[in-house]
């Protein structure tokens, strides 16, 4: 599944992704495939993730950053 990071609360260790059809999905920093990216993650970034459901609602797991076209064409990634 793919979505756009809506907001990240770096000090609290979590954030939200706006997924397809506008569904808001929670993610915890431990759900990132590369946890070193958490501090660099910001709103507007595109991510891919797997979704699961817990008692509070949809939750993203295995979250990975999708490189922008500029990053793929030789720019810096991250």
Image (cartoon, rainbow, N blue to C red):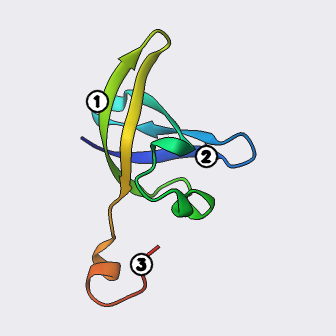
Label 1 Cα crowd, 10 Å radius (few <14 / some 14-19 / many 20+): few
Q: Name the residue under label 3.
A: 77
Q: Which of marks 3 and 2 is nearer the N terminus?
A: 2
| Quadrant occupied by the N terminus | top left
Q: Mark 1 points at which residue?
A: 21
Residues at marks 3 and 1, CA–CA distance in whole angstroms: 28 Å
Residue 45, image quadrant = bottom left
Q: With 46 as the anchor, is 78 left or right in this view?
A: right
**Residue 31 location in percent, x, y?**
46, 42
Residue drawn 69% across the image and 49% down it: 10
Residues at marks 1 and 2, CA–CA distance in whole angstroms: 20 Å
Residue drawn 26% across the image and 87% down it: 73
Whether the residues at callouts 3 and 2 have beta carbons within 8 Å, the answer is: no
Residue drawn 60% across the image and 39% down it: 14
Label 3 Cα crowd, 10 Å radius (few <14 / some 14-19 / many 20+): few
Observer-side mark, 3 or 1, equals: 3
Residue situated furthest bottom in the rendering: 74
Determine whether the residue tagged by mark 1 lies in a helix, strand or loop.
helix
Determine whether the residue tagged by mark 2 lies in a helix, strand or loop.
strand
Residue 7 to residue 65: above or below: above
Residue drawn 33% across the image and 24% down it: 52
Residue 42, image quadrant = bottom right
Residues at marks 3 and 2, CA–CA distance in whole angstroms: 19 Å
Q: Name the residue under label 2.
A: 8
Towards the viewer: 34 or 10: 34
**Residue 39 location in percent, x, y?**
63, 60
Q: Which of marks 1 and 2 is nearer the N terminus?
A: 2
Towards the viewer: 41 or 52: 52
Label 2 Cα crowd, 10 Å radius (few <14 / some 14-19 / many 20+): many
Determine whether the residue tagged by mark 3 lies in a helix, strand or loop.
loop
Residue 60, image quadrant = top left
């Amino acid at each position: 599944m793919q979505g756009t990071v809506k907001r990240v609360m770096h000090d609290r260790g979590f954030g939200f992704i706006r997924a397809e059809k506008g569904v808001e999905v929670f993610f915890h920093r431990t759900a990132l495939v590369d946890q070193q990216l958490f501090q660099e993650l910001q709103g507007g970034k595109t991510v891919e993730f797997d979704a699961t459901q817990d008692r509070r609602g949809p939750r993203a797991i295995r979250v990975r950053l999708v490189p922008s076209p500029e990053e793929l064409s030789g720019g810096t990634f991250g």
